[in-house]
Amino acid sequence: MCSPSVPRPYRPESLPVNAGADEPGTGRGRPRPGFAPAPPALPVPVYDNHTHFDFGENAVDLRAALDAAEAVGIAGAVQVGCDLASSRFTVAAVQADRRVLGAVAIHPNDAPELAGSGGLEAALAEIDALAAHPRIRAIGETGLDYFRTGPDGVADQKYSFRRHIDIAKRRNLALQIHDRDAHGDVVDVLREEGAPSCVVFHCFSGGAELAKICNDNGWYMSFSGTVTFKNSHDLRDAVAVADPALLLVETDAPFLTPHPHRGRPNASYMLPYTVQGLSQLTGLDLAELGTLLAANTEAVYGSWDA
């Protein structure tokens, strides 16, 4: 039974696909739990720095998703593209609702396959063209992923990453980085190419050492629900040393749902759970932290009203 406190767009009767469907990709056939109850509203509105409104098996109308988020203090979101289809969706989303800004890119895991088929250059050219839209404020998510792509794909990932850095610099846009098991190489490529003026480590996954490198370079660290997980000791160490002026917060929805609802699908309305976790780790009260996070986000992406 779904709690009445689950926002209406996310209740099973409102979803086109049953929220209790088998969990995809696990091979276990376990029932997937439904969406979690909405948290208490934040005292100061913040922004979801990274989300995917077009992902997930339980599709929710864009406006309804944003309404549910706004009801708990999420003023807006950055919709992030990972391939041509999701980047095209991103442009449509920023045109459909003023609470959305966008980022477009080819995900590092897709770069080797596109390079092998001869389609990478055309894909990068389209990303460059999509980035011309005035409400596209970042190039991302791009970077390096050594978890899902083996050594044979490293050269193509690095080439694609360098090209995305060039697009961000030419268009004066922020760069949203996907960094999985590749901290050293990501930093090396940024230094070799010369980083754009705004760099964001999306779903920050490093420890104190990477946080100090970000501090030294003025690179932003965006924390997701993983920072609330009980075993995330490295992330808590990173928060402890991170410059507060470089902190951001995100959902990466529909993934990485924060504690205490880990395992359920994520959504932008769930962001306050992560903000509460960061409040405990930083020692800042929710209003103080919210003001800080909102200012940091607008420093990266500009105004949602522009």
Image (spheres, rainbow, N blue to C red):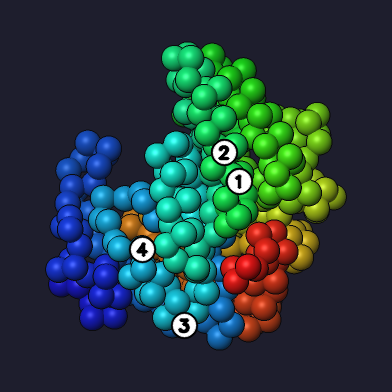
Sort mark 2 into few (<14), some (14-19) or many (20+) by Cα contacts within 10 Å: few
Tag 3 residue? 41
Along the horizontal axis of the image, is 55 left or right of 287? Answer: left
Where residue 176 appears, x then y in whole percent?
Answer: 62, 46
Circle nearer the N terminus (3, 2): 3
Q: Does the CB distance between marks 1 and 2 fall below 8 Å? A: yes
* Viewer-side residue, 283 vs 41: 41
Q: Amino acid at mark 2?
A: Ala
Q: Amino acid at mark 1?
A: Ala
Q: Amino acid at mark 3?
A: Ala
Q: Can you tell which of label 1 and label 3 is closer to the viewer?
A: 1
Disc marking residue 132 = 1
Q: Does the CB distance between marks 2 and 4 fall below 8 Å? A: no
Q: At numbered mark 4, what does the secondary structure look like: helix, strand or loop?
A: helix
Circle nearer the N terminus (1, 3): 3
Along the horizontal axis of the image, is 143 left or right of 116? Answer: right
